Amino acid sequence: MSLTGWLLLAASVCDPDAALLRADFGDGVRLIGSEPCSVVGDFNGDGASDRAWVVRVTGMLKAGVRAENPWKLSGAGPVGLAVALSGSPRRLYFLTDSDYFGSPMWGHPEGLISARRQGKGHVLLVATESGEDMRLSFDGKVWVLRPDQ
């Protein structure tokens, strides 16, 4: 299936998630993949539900969205993770790396992110080509990437 086909499938199956994504990040962000449409967990340990999506940036991000690169392989790219941390203030992140998300597996990102309880919150598990997940966690200031244990 072409990227256009995947985007149409994601749009039809994931309309509620796509609407939440656009509300937080703006019209310049598109949901890609549909399994899962988004992942919910407490990524900053504050007791409130946070949400993450696999996205493609096609235009401008809303003001206030922070772009970060926890992979540090290369520069920013159009594909990555949009993460909305609930609470006050609400924090929005676009996590990207053009080399990491340039891998062919991210062309059809089905089942590549999930959440797992750790401590008083959750970590975001992000797939790799080797089949080993990476733990992506928020330390209160920045996103930290570690091999899964």
Image (spheres, rainbow, N blue to C red):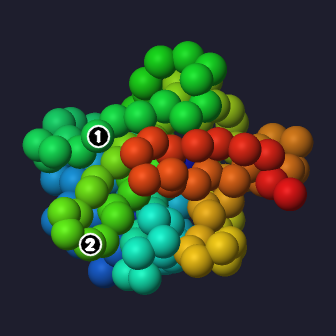
Residue at point 43% right, 53% down? 140
Front in this rendered view, residue 97 or 44: 44
| 2 relative to 17 in the view: left or right | right
Q: Examine the rendered structure and indicate whether residue 59 appears above or below residue 47.
A: above
On the image, the x and y values in percent for residue 26 come to 16, 53
On the image, the x and y values in percent for residue 138 come to 50, 53
SS under mark 1 = strand
Q: Which residue in the structure is indicated by mark 1?
A: 66
Check disc 2 and give the amino acid type: Gly
Q: Which residue lies furthest to the left in this view?
A: 63
Residue at point 68% right, 72% down? 118
In which image quadrant can residue 117 be found? bottom right
Q: Which of marks 1 and 2 is in front?
A: 2
On the image, the x and y values in percent for residue 144 come to 58, 43
Circle number at residue 87 = 2
| 114 relative to 97 in the view: left or right | right
Label 1 vs 2, first from the N-terminus? 1
SS under mark 2 = loop
| 51 relative to 127 in the view: left or right | left
In which image quadrant can residue 78 be found? top left
Residue at point 72% right, 44% down? 146
Does the image show residue 19? yes
On the image, the x and y values in percent for residue 44 come to 45, 65
| 108 relative to 47 in the view: left or right | right
